[in-house]
Amino acid sequence: GAVVSQHPSWVICKSGTSVKIECRSLDFQATTMFWYRQFPKQSLMLMATSNEGSKATYEQGVEKDKFLINHASLTLSTLTVTSAHPEDSSFYICSAYTNEQFFGPGTRLTVL
Amino acid sequence: QKEVEQDPGPLSVPEGAIVSLNCTYSNSAFQYFMWYRQYSRKGPELLMYTYSSGNKEDGRFTAQVDKSSKYISLFIRDSQPSDSATYLCAMSPDSNYQLIWGAGTKLIIKP
């Protein structure tokens, strides 16, 4: 089956620093990747839809200057949390779309 | 009112029991209905995918869609401790491109 990886799986950073999360489709090409955020005991919240070679479409309430998304190739999308603060601590999950969404294992971000 | 309502649980049942998980929705345009399983600190994995109304069976899992009542269900037969996870329903009006998610129900199967 289609495999999606995320790196890192867990990251701790200091407040004010930036963190980059990678999402890769390992055995297929995905023109579209989705980025979600999930707080404890809550469902997935779509942050943005990323299409290869074009600007990401952000959901209402998601700051595009804070959550920078780059989808430079058909197998890689990155999410950069800029100037991270403790309230950005969350579980970030990506999915890659090819007839269905295949999800990565998630990245746990803790901002101190 | 949320577009998709799902009881977060937790739902705790003994091993071997039949489990019933449900979601209700308000948007009559939804045509595609999915159930995902998510283990703790992992990404969701697709369990069942149903188009429009009807039933679909896959091993111990059965998905039902009742569009007239705007109600979907996932049944798990002969539940196992390894079925313990959070089950999320998701739906879409047009394939599974952009999904509207339920809150997820935490299921605990007691040995």
Image: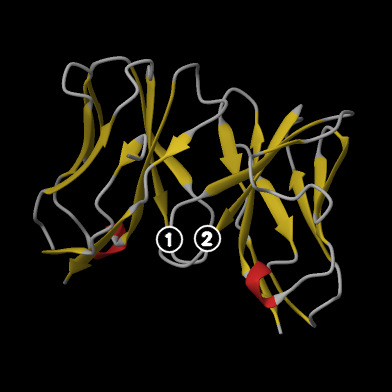
In-image side of B78 versus A17 (left or right): left
Q: Secondary structure at mark 2?
A: loop
Quadrant hosting residue A14? bottom right
To the question of a shared chain for discs 1 and 2, the answer is yes
Instruction: Write down the residue under mark 1.
Output: B39
The mark tally for this picture is 2
Q: Is residue A46 left or right of residue B22?
A: right
**In which quadrant of the rendered image does the N terminus of chain A lie?**
top right
Tell me which amino acid carries mark 1: Tyr
Residue placed at 51% from the left, 66% from the top? Answer: B41
Label 1–label 2 contact, CB within 8 A: yes
Q: Residues within 10 Å of mark 2 (few under 14, many from 20)?
A: some
Q: Could you say whether the residue bearing mark 1 is in a helix, strand or loop?
A: loop
Q: Is residue A85 above or below residue B87?
A: below
Of residues A36 and A95, the one nearer the viewer is A36
Q: Chain of mark 1?
A: B
**Residue B4 visible in the snapshot:** yes
In this rendering, position of residue A12 left or right of residue A98: right
Q: Is residue A18 above or below residue A56?
A: below
What numbered label is drawn on residue A12?
none
Q: Going 18% across and 54% down the picture, which residue do you hit?
A: B79
The residue marked by circle 2 belongs to what chain? B
Q: Position of residue B72 (x, y in %)?
A: 23, 31
- Asked if residue B50 lies left or right of residue A88, the reply is left
User: Quarter-wise, where is residue B4 in the image?
Assistant: top left
Disc sitting over residue B42 in the figure: 2
Give the colour scheme shown. secondary structure
